[in-house]
Image: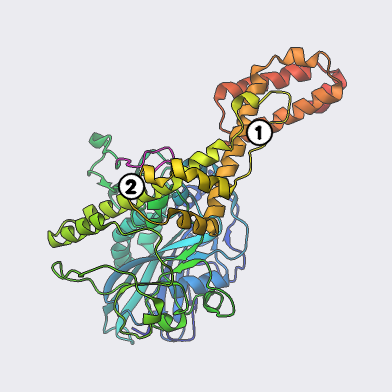
């Protein structure tokens, strides 16, 4: 398939998308405005077609007032078609991730903070990237001059819900390819009636006569969270389609104790706007994971330290004799065998027991869901064994609660010392929970040099700082405010009011982990303190 040839993507004639708009995002809406609920799940829906004169062309954007920059339109067009070398016939589903180009995030995403505070790190809304979920159809069609019908339906979202949106596309796309725009408008109107994404809750999402039932994981879930329960079945006709996960295909979810802090693109082509940025040899390879199908990248990126080449699926009885890492120097020809080619030496030994279980499962034709569960469980336990010592050491840096007094600035979190942490591993290291042997110290030292440690540390330090501030607010609310005010000047009292108000606003915005009773007491303290001031100051602090 040479669908990527041509003069490049342009907006097709007569498309429903907004023309000539330069800023990214949608015009401001109030929560009750049309498409506000739709926007909680999706940014927009796009249709990309292949035009003999234009190449890939954006045929439709819905809702039609959603604004995409020219650069974003170009990226969506190129990334929504499989590479010309892949030869896809029939229906194909895949996903991509692209950078958002400029523009301000829209006001109806003000609830991002609330959602992100409850969702696991791996499932939080992306602030600067879009996910594209694609359903591509290529079939022979003699009525088309080129001889093939080629079109993609694309859901654009900032949520990494691979499983949910692929299931949604499997319902929508076949119907859309038959009935076109009217079908799409009806589906978008249905999505605009959905409840907002709520971590920890089971949601019923009606679309095209089917109720999709999902549960978005919460950050307080245990590692082995159960799939959504089929609740209120008597009120749902027909019975709902229950998805065990909204994100199962997102492998990074297995590492949600440790956020992946680099860029990643599940599908990437030579036409991508960041192609030159990622493939330059004038600097070290960027911290990014690229998914590609074009063999051109084997030669272009052979200097990258890690290359995983995936081959065609094998028959169940055709098993590899051994699993080993290969040096990148062996990855030079287009017919290179599948495998992991890496310039690094593994720090940990292989888990031979796991490999035997997986290979035995292939022989016995064990369902792929079970195989995937085994692999995810292994990765989760390995990551937890790695991260628990870091969590314990980080917790030791927190000031003792007894050192937090109401009328003094709370003590600071002690700095992270890599040497102190490494010394602590002798008695409190991963060997307590993991049987794998190897150079754990070397693995931690490499981790300290990566963006992932920086991202993990910043997030944990931020959470601890908020907890410290919450404890300080609780200490103030438990103190006798009237006794404190007896020998204080008006300036000191006003300063306390302003500080308490600031803490209260942050706490009410779900930034501070405090109880409702603490918030009520803080509000009462503010009113008590203001009531003790002269009338002129009261008027300043509480204007009519």
Q: Is residue 317 magenta?
A: no
Figure label count: 2
Position of residue 234 in the picture relative to residue 48 (left or right): left
Alpha-carbon span between mark 2 and mark 1: 37 Å
Q: Which mark is residue 449?
A: none
The percent position of residue 197, horizontal first and vertical second, equals: 43, 44
Q: Is residue 161 above or below residue 522?
A: below
The percent position of residue 373, horizontal first and vertical second, equals: 27, 51
Q: Which residue is mark 2?
A: 206
Residue 4 seen by the camera: no
Q: Which residue is mark 1?
A: 505
SS at mark 1 in the image: helix
Position of residue 420 in the picture relative to residue 439 (left or right): right
Q: Is residue 496 above or below residue 116?
A: above
The percent position of residue 123, horizontal first and vertical second, equals: 44, 50
Residue 226 seen by the camera: yes
Position of residue 317 in the picture relative to residue 332 (left or right): left
SS at mark 2 in the image: strand
The percent position of residue 461, horizontal first and vertical second, equals: 59, 43
Residue at 22 percent across and 52 percent down: it is: 370
Mark 2 burial class by Cα count in 10 Å: few <14, some 14-19, many 20+: some
Residue at 32 percent across and 83 percent down: it is: 144
- Which mark's residue is nearer the viewer, 2 or 1? 1
The one nearer the camera, 418 or 449, is 418
Q: Is residue 223 magenta?
A: yes
Residue at 28 percent across and 38 percent down: it is: 229
Q: Earlier in the sequence, mark 2 or mark 1?
A: 2
Figure quadrant of residue 401: top right
Q: Is residue 147 above or below residue 216?
A: below
Q: Which residues lie in the magenta part?
A: 217-226
């Amino acid at each position: 398939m040479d669908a990527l040839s041509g003069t490049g993507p342009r907006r097709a004639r007569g498309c429903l998308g907004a023309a000539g708009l330069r800023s990214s995002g949608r015009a401001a809406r109030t929560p009750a405005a049309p498409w506000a609920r739709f926007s909680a799940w999706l940014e927009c829906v796009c249709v990309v077609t292949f035009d003999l004169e234009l190449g890939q062309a954006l045929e439709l954007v819905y809702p039609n007032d959603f604004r995409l920059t020219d650069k974003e339109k170009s990226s969506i067009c190129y990334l929504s078609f499989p590479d010309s070398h892949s030869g896809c016939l029939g229906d194909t589903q895949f996903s991509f991730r692209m950078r958002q180009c400029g523009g301000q995030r829209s006001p109806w995403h003000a609830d991002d903070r609330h959602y992100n505070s409850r969702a696991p790190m791996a499932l939080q809304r992306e602030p600067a990237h879009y996910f594209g979920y694609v359903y591509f159809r290529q079939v022979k069609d003699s009525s088309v001059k080129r001889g093939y019908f080629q079109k993609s339906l694309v859901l654009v979202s900032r949520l990494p819900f691979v499983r949910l949106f692929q299931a949604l596309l499997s319902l929508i796309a076949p119907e859309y390819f038959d009935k076109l725009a009217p079908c799409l408008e009806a589906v978008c109107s249905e999505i605009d009636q959905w409840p907002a994404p709520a971590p920890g809750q089971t949601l019923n999402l009606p679309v095209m006569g089917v109720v999709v039932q999902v549960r978005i994981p919460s950050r307080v879930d245990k590692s082995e969270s159960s799939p959504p329960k089929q609740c209120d079945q008597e009120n749902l006709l027909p019975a709902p389609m229950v998805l065990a996960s909204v994100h199962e295909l997102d492998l990074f979810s297995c590492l949600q104790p440790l956020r992946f802090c680099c860029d990643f693109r599940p599908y990437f082509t030579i036409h991508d706007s960041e192609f030159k940025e990622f493939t330059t040899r004038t600097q070290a390879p960027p911290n990014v994971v690229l998914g590609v199908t074009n063999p051109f990248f084997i030669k272009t990126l052979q200097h990258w330290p890690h290359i995983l080449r995936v081959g065609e699926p094998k028959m169940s009885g055709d098993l590899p004799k051994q699993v080993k890492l290969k040096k990148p120097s062996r990855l030079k020809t287009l017919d290179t065998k599948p495998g992991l080619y890496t310039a690094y030496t593994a720090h940990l030994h292989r888990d031979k027991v796991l490999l035997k279980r997986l290979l035995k499962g292939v022989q016995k034709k064990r369902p792929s869901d079970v195989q995937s569960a085994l692999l995810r469980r292994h990765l989760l336990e390995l990551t937890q064994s790695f991260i628990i010592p870091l969590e314990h050491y980080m917790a030791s840096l927190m000031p003792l609660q007894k050192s937090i007094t109401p009328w003094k600035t709370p003590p600071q979190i002690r700095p992270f010392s890599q040497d102190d942490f490494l010394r602590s591993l002798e008695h409190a290291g991963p060997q307590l929970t993991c049987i794998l042997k190897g150079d754990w110290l070397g693995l931690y030292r490499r981790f300290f040099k990566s963006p992932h440690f920086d991202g993990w540390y910043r997030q944990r330090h931020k959470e601890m700082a908020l907890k410290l501030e919450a404890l300080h607010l609780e200490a103030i609310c438990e103190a006798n405010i009237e006794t404190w005010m007896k020998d204080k000047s008006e300036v000191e009292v006003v300063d306390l009011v302003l500080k308490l108000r600031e803490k209260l606003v942050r706490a009410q915005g779900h930034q501070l982990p405090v109880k409702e009773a603490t918030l009520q007491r803080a509000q009462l303290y503010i009113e008590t303190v203001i009531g003790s001031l002269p009338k002129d100051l009261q008027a300043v602090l509480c204007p009519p």
